[in-house]
Image (cartoon, rainbow, N blue to C red):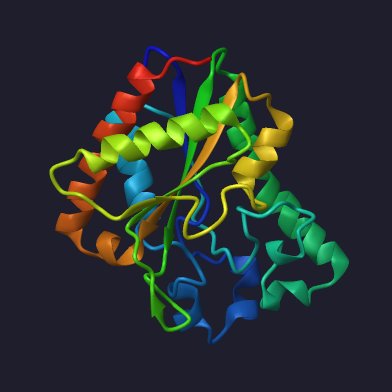
Amino acid sequence: MAALELVISCEHGGHRVPPAYRSLFAGQGALLRSHRGWDPGALLVARALARALDAPLIAATTTRLLVDLNRSPHNPRVFSKTTRALPREARAALLERHHRPHWDRLRAALARRDTLTVHVAVHSFTPVWEGRRRPITVGLLYDPKRARERRFALRWKQQLARAPETHPIRRNAPYRGDADGLTTAMRRERPASRYLGLELELDQADLADAGRRRRLVTTLGASLRAVCDGFVPR
């Protein structure tokens, strides 16, 4: 990566419940394994991209129903319905033991880089929401007010569209790229001259099929490498 450096993260990589909190989720195994408990397939993609692009990976496998690592600590939705009912001290302990370490690992990875760094946070989304099919396979989320992020996302989309196996690709879908989350928080901490934060959102139906997932990872890796190698900051 000549023009810039790359860091990969995955905030919802598993549905693990630490032993101290298992009684809270008794009888909720199906919920934990559902898309509400984690992002199926996201960690597999994040690991593959990190290997292919020789990038550091900061990943977590604790269920988002314990504490959501893609929410700011002050956001009420950082806690699920289950953990929101805990006493204040218990919620503070969750943030300290499980939320803050992930964010601090990312901060440390970014701080070790002395040039413009692209942070790609890998997530997945359920293909059907509120009874409607989402007509998208790949979502590239970014802050439209940050010109470099906008330009990077556009070039990545263009590279993806050139792939032999095309996918429905949209920018800032199925979610807003400037909504509260890890990349949004890092933008407040790091200048636009040093940090580009993008969320990569992938259709869980594609990731559930091993063959389709491998082909998608190959396309994502090649396109991301091409953008990073040719990107000229200005």
**Vertical order, 112 against 144 (above or below):** above
Residue at horizontal 66 percent and vertical 55 percent from the top: 71
Nearer to us in this view, 85 or 226: 226
Give percent across and percent down for residue 69. Answer: 61, 53
**Vertical order, 122 against 82 (above or below):** above
For residue 233, side relative to residue 101 (left or right): left
Asked if residue 13 can be seen in this view, the reply is: yes
Task: Give the quarter of the image for residue 103.
Answer: top right
Asked if residue 102 can be seen in this view, the reply is: no
Quadrant where the N terminus lies? top left
Nearer to us in this view, 225 or 173: 173
Residue at horizontal 40 percent and vertical 19 percent from the top: 231
Count of residue discs: 0
Residue at horizontal 70 percent and vertical 51 percent from the top: 97
**Vertical order, 178 against 104 (above or below):** below
Give percent across and percent down for residue 40. Answer: 38, 63
Give percent across and percent down for residue 206. Answer: 26, 61
For residue 39, side relative to residue 182 (left or right): left
Q: In the orientation shown, which residue stands out farthest toward the bottom?
A: 27
Nearer to us in this view, 150 or 96: 150
For residue 121, side relative to residue 219 (left or right): right
Task: Give the quarter of the image for residue 224.
Answer: top left
**Vertical order, 93 against 143 (above or below):** below
Give percent across and percent down for residue 234. Answer: 53, 14
Q: In the orientation shown, which residue stands out farthest toward the right?
A: 88
For residue 127, side relative to residue 71 (left or right): left
Residue at horizontal 21 percent and vertical 38 percent from the top: 162
Task: Give the quarter of the image for residue 136.
Answer: bottom left
